[in-house]
Image (cartoon, grey):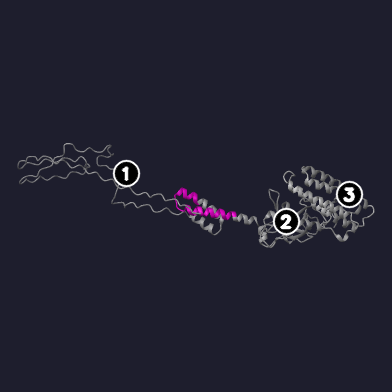
Amino acid sequence: MDFRKEADEPEATPADPAPTPLAPAPAPAPVAPAPLAGAVPPPAPADPWAAPDLAPAAPVAPAPPVVGHPQPVPLPSAAPPQPPHPLPAGGWASVTPSAQAGFRPDQPYPQPAGPAPTNGFAVGSLVTGLVMVAPVALVFGIVALVQINRRKERGFGLAVAGVVLGTIGTLLLSLLLGAGNFSGAGGGRFAHAPKAPAGSVHWSDLKTGDCYNSPAGGSVTGTDGDETVYWVNRVACAEPHHGEVAGTVPFPTGSGAYPGESEVRESAARLCRKVMDDYALDQWAVPDGMDDVYLYPTANNWAAGERYATCAFEDRDDQHRGTVRTDRSRLTAPQLAYLEAVRVFNDAYLEQPKQEVSEAGADYRSWARRMAVASRTEAAVLGAPTTDWPADVRPKIAKLVEAQSQAAPAWDSAASADDLEGGIRRAKALVAKTVPMSVDIRRALGLSTGEQVPDLRV
């Protein structure tokens, strides 16, 4: 960018003194006849422009007798020149100080004005901008522009350059500071805080199976509801706690450049879904209020090598005791078979688009096709002869298999129907009929029915 420097104003030069007008020469007068010998010549006529002589007159010696022919005496012109109008106060020869011009013995000639000084804030703005002290350069540049305009100083181009550098540097600094966080779904973010509360640990220190609480000052919630998490207190899961870590998962693109926050966020949600399902196979045993939380890196964390997502269950309002982890070693074969069979359908159902049907028609049609596949898969796994269901559970399983077999065509119809919204609504109505069946099967198998108690198993 070229900076245009304003031209300096022309310097004022002292005005040349006006030439003093010459008095007109008196016209030659006719020669008077020579006076007689011994006669006294008449006195010279008075000069009307002369200043009055206030000194006492010196005695005049008598003129010596004239020898020879006397010299002619010039007479004044018939019309002496008139004084200028108006007359200055003080008489004919009075001159006011403002009318004096030119060289005076008691004063030197006026010197021409030198170049205007360069504004100091303008220089400081440019220097601080070059050394990347951006906020200071911006402030100095603004102050310099104001002073240059008032004082008519130089340095306008320096001030503008400092403001430009300060603005660019401030924006870059803001972006760098904003990139130093670890972000999470639904408000989860962890970053590098300058000081940790007593007894707290950094989020990145948590491992699979750790339970934690958020200490005072350990996180900040923005106006949009997003929370920036810095520090947590690690506690035993038998103690009251807000969250539990299900595990961490690396990003498949971890060896490349940062793919962008939006893509990383979506990838973290997709990767954490499997991690959390493996950790808590029985999702109905997770207490109400404990939501899925996943934390993902921003560009700054990515550059530092933190290229993984942390997956957790967290209840920000209430505390819980015990763990949500499913201990497969304690499950019976029918219990494990049922949980594995319904897992695919539950995962697909949770992938419903968040927009309205009218706003995301293509996404809803794709989701309906996935739901049709999930319904057929659950019916096939539950109806397979490989599982030895208890006698009282077998008829309930058969009823659920029939309901899912009917729901699959409904999802197919919704995916291709002209009335997409109506087709989705009819398919969901069939799914709602399977909820009481699932509750009966869970109760018969000894699994959680979703009726949570204050404390979980320890």
Q: Residue 368 appears at what percent x and percent y?
A: 79, 48
Identified by mark 2, the residue type is Ser
Q: Residue 257 appears at what percent x and percent y?
A: 66, 60
Is any atom of residue 183 visible in this view?
A: no
Is any atom of residue 249 visible in this view?
A: yes
The residue identified by callout 3 is 402
Q: Which residues are magenta?
A: 144-171
Q: Which mark is residue 441?
A: none
Examine the residues drawn in magenta and state their main secondary structure.
helix
Assess whether residue 365 is covered by the magenta stretch: no
Q: From the viewer's perspective, is the residue at label 3 or at label 2 nearer?
A: 3
**Mark 2 element type:** helix
Front position in the image: 14 or 169:
169
Q: Residue 341 appears at what percent x and percent y?
A: 85, 55
Tell me if 456 is positioned left or right of 258 in this view: right
Res 33 quadrant in image: top left
The residue identified by callout 2 is 267
Quarter occupied by the C terminus: bottom right
Number of other residues with Cα within 10 Å of mark 2, as a class: few under 14, some 14 to 19, many 20 or more: some
The residue identified by callout 1 is 98
Number of other residues with Cα within 10 Å of mark 3, as a class: few under 14, some 14 to 19, many 20 or more: few
